[in-house]
Image (cartoon, coloured by chain):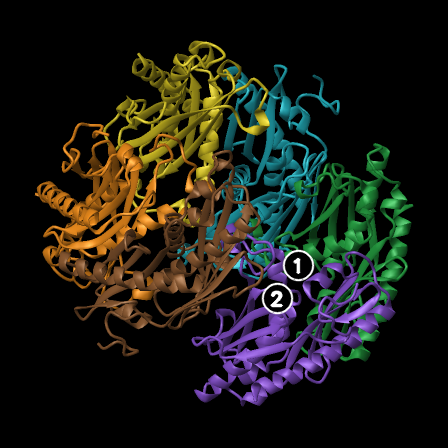
Chain colours: A brown, B purple, C green, D cyan, E yellow, F orange
Amino acid sequence: MARPDGRRPDQLRPVTLTRGWSSHPEGSVLVEFGATRVLCTASVTEGVPRWRKGSGLGWVTAEYAMLPRATNTRSDRESVRGKIGGRTHEISRLIGRSLRACVDLKALGENSVVLDCDVLQADGGTRTAAITGAYVALHDAVTWLAERKSLAGKVDKVMHRSVAAVSVGIIDGEPRLDLCYEEDVAAEVDMNVVCTGTGDFVEVQGTGEAGIFSRAQLDALLDLGVLGCLELADAQRKALQ
Amino acid sequence: MARPDGRRPDQLRPVTLTRGWSSHPEGSVLVEFGATRVLCTASVTEGVPRWRKGSGLGWVTAEYAMLPRATNTRSDRESVRGKIGGRTHEISRLIGRSLRACVDLKALGENSVVLDCDVLQADGGTRTAAITGAYVALHDAVTWLAERKSLAGKVDKVMHRSVAAVSVGIIDGEPRLDLCYEEDVAAEVDMNVVCTGTGDFVEVQGTGEAGIFSRAQLDALLDLGVLGCLELADAQRKALQ
Amino acid sequence: MARPDGRRPDQLRPVTLTRGWSSHPEGSVLVEFGATRVLCTASVTEGVPRWRKGSGLGWVTAEYAMLPRATNTRSDRESVRGKIGGRTHEISRLIGRSLRACVDLKALGENSVVLDCDVLQADGGTRTAAITGAYVALHDAVTWLAERKSLAGKVDKVMHRSVAAVSVGIIDGEPRLDLCYEEDVAAEVDMNVVCTGTGDFVEVQGTGEAGIFSRAQLDALLDLGVLGCLELADAQRKALQ
Amino acid sequence: MARPDGRRPDQLRPVTLTRGWSSHPEGSVLVEFGATRVLCTASVTEGVPRWRKGSGLGWVTAEYAMLPRATNTRSDRESVRGKIGGRTHEISRLIGRSLRACVDLKALGENSVVLDCDVLQADGGTRTAAITGAYVALHDAVTWLAERKSLAGKVDKVMHRSVAAVSVGIIDGEPRLDLCYEEDVAAEVDMNVVCTGTGDFVEVQGTGEAGIFSRAQLDALLDLGVLGCLELADAQRKALQ
Amino acid sequence: MARPDGRRPDQLRPVTLTRGWSSHPEGSVLVEFGATRVLCTASVTEGVPRWRKGSGLGWVTAEYAMLPRATNTRSDRESVRGKIGGRTHEISRLIGRSLRACVDLKALGENSVVLDCDVLQADGGTRTAAITGAYVALHDAVTWLAERKSLAGKVDKVMHRSVAAVSVGIIDGEPRLDLCYEEDVAAEVDMNVVCTGTGDFVEVQGTGEAGIFSRAQLDALLDLGVLGCLELADAQRKALQ
Amino acid sequence: MARPDGRRPDQLRPVTLTRGWSSHPEGSVLVEFGATRVLCTASVTEGVPRWRKGSGLGWVTAEYAMLPRATNTRSDRESVRGKIGGRTHEISRLIGRSLRACVDLKALGENSVVLDCDVLQADGGTRTAAITGAYVALHDAVTWLAERKSLAGKVDKVMHRSVAAVSVGIIDGEPRLDLCYEEDVAAEVDMNVVCTGTGDFVEVQGTGEAGIFSRAQLDALLDLGVLGCLELADAQRKALQ
């Protein structure tokens, strides 16, 4: 199976990061990986949750969701069903952990940031696009705090690393970067790689539901994932200039 | 208090209706009334809910929701709270009733359409923008059904009326059309008017929480509302060409 | 279709307002509009919700519900289903708004009143009966507060307007006042009118789900609604003597 | 502590059973034990739950609830809280078991009856009043089924026993029948006795939360409970004539 | 029907009380009544719920639950269904009341103990085994508090009574002690007896869903229940040495 | 920081797999990794969920939960809170995916197996212990199906791979196998490795919340994880003999 959009195996889809897409939030980015489109907003509140008060540390958390018709078939709203599904929970937690890894919570001071990542249109890789976009939105929110003299440290101290993420997978035995939905479904192995701007790992999640994978395959996927993340880090840097 | 954006009292905000904003749904429209931005998608499923099977009638329903940071302050997600709030319920029901009023359910045949209206950015008038946009999305979905020869009647028979909606209110004694958020909060009386393309009423909801209103004020608001709806009907017609 | 109970089009059903129907609440009224029977209780608590503390303003809110067999067919309890339905939400909010419109919250002082409107038997017009009865229950609760010297102002200052409500509708082209269930189901247009004792509007909600309505029809319904509300205001005055 | 209303220790409060209190249900009884007031309705549906289909047996179940201001202090609605409390669950189950004990489910045929017991005003003994009233409502519903020729057996065969219930307790060492709220709170031991019309036991529940009780005390309470139930059975017989 | 395990009618199943079965809780007991196996843990927290603060009294509460496959057929988890069932609620409340009856809450001081009773394997009598085991776990937790000098009184003062429970029932007309599941299902009458170590009653619950029972049968069951509880009290004493 | 129990860095805790720990389920295993103790039961039902009917394929799913006092501090029950937490969801999904990877669903035929993994006592590595134990319970359940001639294929065909899992982490720069709770909390990097009995990967999840990790560290952890899984596969083989 060739790549549906004719990309090379190690090629990302066109990536755009539109800052300030909405006007209310302290940071807001519409991130697109090809047809995947996620609105990432960063909402600042002074103070931290009760269990953290007086610690001098800030807090960063994330919530991921999909519009009901972001996908090819309509899904029921989780608000209507009255509960959050397992997949949503899992991805929200992954985004939160990944973003906290790039923030110095002490330098943030006792401020809280909620990162809302709402998928407006899905074509594979929504969680990795969300992490990549949320980093930029968070950076804007931290800058906003700095302008109000509300940070304990400087912006560069708070955002001491950048973080980006990409999906990789093996289709017909071929390792590929940044899978679209059609490839995601066909993948024998599927992995999400979260890296810093210097290519260190923050999180690695590989799954072989339809099958198993060898160390050699795993190594190839990690190589590809790091490559993709470095390219995304570049796009983030440009977007933030 | 002058209008924040310098409009005349009987002037709508700039209205845009972007068809095909997302690629998966059978109909999808990004509707903008000034800074208010609502994504309306129409999702078709063959067949109707169990209680309607064998009736020969179709079904149209709507769900309204807001992204957590569509507003100036972040609201908790209804999915996280585990229940739908009263305001959401109320608006979803209003949109559903309004759209059903413009559809011949017999000509639709045993097909169901769900209209999802998700507010991406709010600046007053989200429910009326949603109705106005959902009409266009529904029209596209019905055309899609017609192309698949799945309608019981023709498109024009199914969509036998157009429907649009606008908010009107009295601020400092002055009746105004299409209130933005700042005006909505300041209004003594607030009314939503839903009309057909020929200026008949589908739904009228007037509230004077902060005060009461006379028949004369009500009449002035109705006049203004019909005027606004006719202009919106025009915009819908142009968008559908 | 003639009126099932032989009334003139502009005639209310027999209305009774039984004060003190139950002994625990600070105010309690069994209101009957024909066979529609709603128990309205007013429960006072000192203080206001957290978000209102220190404002010097009181708070009035309402909850509407139906016993499972108030209607012809049994409905599942919302407590058993684990969630409040949209209709219930919508009506609770309408009652709350309507009653707040008749209260001077500053003169009430930092006291809260919850108005519970439980439909014991339904035959159309339950929400309008609820508003009409709740006003009387609220008046008794405010008097109770006055007797305990717990009001910031006088009873007449707090209850500076009376409020009542009635349904009107068009059946077979004829505008009718105070629809019973059978008429409600058959109505082409259905409107709820909430008025003060002097005939000003507090809330107007007209719906034409099965069809649309003209300005002339709307005008006829408003006339009829005001007429009915004035008669109900009279009944409230008598009940409170 | 003397009895608040001057009754003898073995004396019931005035008991009234008003049949046909509401017009929609197949059986409906307003039962009053002094100031305790419970509306019991019996709702018939043809057929039985899925797990019972084809068994030839009917089904009887019960739901108990309190209006929020049935008591001296307002309680939050269970529908608003989104869940049924333990006490409500416990009482609903007790009523259901008690009523099933008086019904021949085979003679009932594949019909279902739901007994809704809604406390309009509470002054102790609501669950026992509910059982006593629900029996009469159920009897009316079964007669209704007989009139429609929908029973597998005759009314007397279906309702082969009567069932009634009363609370008993020990206050200041004295066994008392049919406790009002004030006594209930003060009781060292509290027992609910459910009996057939011939004085056999259907259910016995004795609790000594504040203390413990001896066999002699238990015996005295059982004697008193049977006595009260026989008197209530008499009242039921009279009501059904 | 003979007893499935050949016991005499007045014979308990083999009872074991394994203290310290798990290492984290302040008290933990694996209680076995034949094949019925319940893990009872006592968790101490300093302080009491808000509504009890400053009273000088402690608080003891209980939660009962079953693992999904503790029984012959798998039940859905209550966490997955999103609500606690009526039976679970009822039993949790029974355990809490029973244990509070054996504790001097003043001598406990402002400490809270939660008793978690999780059924790992069920073969009848799970609630009575839970009460019997929870008493021992609670005793250990109170001793733990004493060692930390956190009690208001002495251990013997706090635990001023012991409490144990057993089920009894009538099968084929024969009163039997400590029913296993097979007997429980076949019982005409089923009773749970909760007694102190001196044979006084704490709680008595008898049900005749499949039938009714006479005073003579009730007396026989009570005799048997007290006998069983005294034997269990003996086992508790030995376990605590 | 030395290992709390004096193990070598590449040494597992004592592992025991007790088959048939409970008597009702078709497969049941108490798995212990040191003080971590998880009860894994496999429940068989004939047939598959509706969406899978007629596919000829079976279904395997898993649910993970913790007793409230399995940990050092008591957690509220998810049934009481009315919803499943994100961590629980995430782990249940991981166990399900891992077990499905070892099963030939076609050879299983249209049968369903639910794997319930309930943590009775937690000391780190509960999810990996659960996967390791669930494999053995599933094997027993499949054998049970074979004995009833209910499988589409043979046991060896259905269970065509074994699967086991272990946690690895870096503490003070040292890669360690099978972390206990104390080490888990202190780890800079934490990884769960799920492998087949031949050392292929099924799932790899590495997280560096407190920090980041290099490719070299990742490689060391993967080596250690595979080693541990092979040893666990050996223990599974022995347990199944």
* Place of residue A110 in the rendered image (x, y in percent of width and height, measured from the top left): 51, 40
Q: Report in which chain the residue with disc 1 lies.
A: C
Instruction: Return the residue at label 1.
Output: C90
Residue at image position (30%, 35%) is: F186
**Discs 2 and 1 carry the same chain letter:** no
* Place of residue C99 in the rendered image (x, y in percent of width and height, measured from the top left): 78, 52
Residue at image position (20%, 40%) is: F29
Work out whether residue E84 can be spotted: no
Q: In which quarter of the image is residue F160?
A: bottom left
Check the picture and name the quadrant holding the N terminus of chain B. bottom right
Q: In which quarter of the image is residue D192?
A: top right
Mark 1, secondary structure of its residue: helix
Instruction: Return the residue at label 2.
Output: B93
Name the amino acid, label 1.
Answer: Glu
Work out whether residue F36 can be spotted: yes
Relative to the observer, which residue lies in front, A145 or B138? Answer: A145
| F144 on left or right of C237 | left
Relative to the observer, which residue lies in front, A127 or C192? Answer: A127
* Place of residue E212 in the rendered image (x, y in percent of width and height, measured from the top left): 47, 35
* Place of residue D148 in the rendered image (x, y in percent of width and height, measured from the top left): 58, 62
Residue D75 drawn above or below residue E147? below
Marks 2 and 1 in Cβ contact (< 8 Å) = yes
| B37 on left or right of F69 | right
| F83 on left or right of C158 | left
Residue E232 drawn above or below residue F190? above
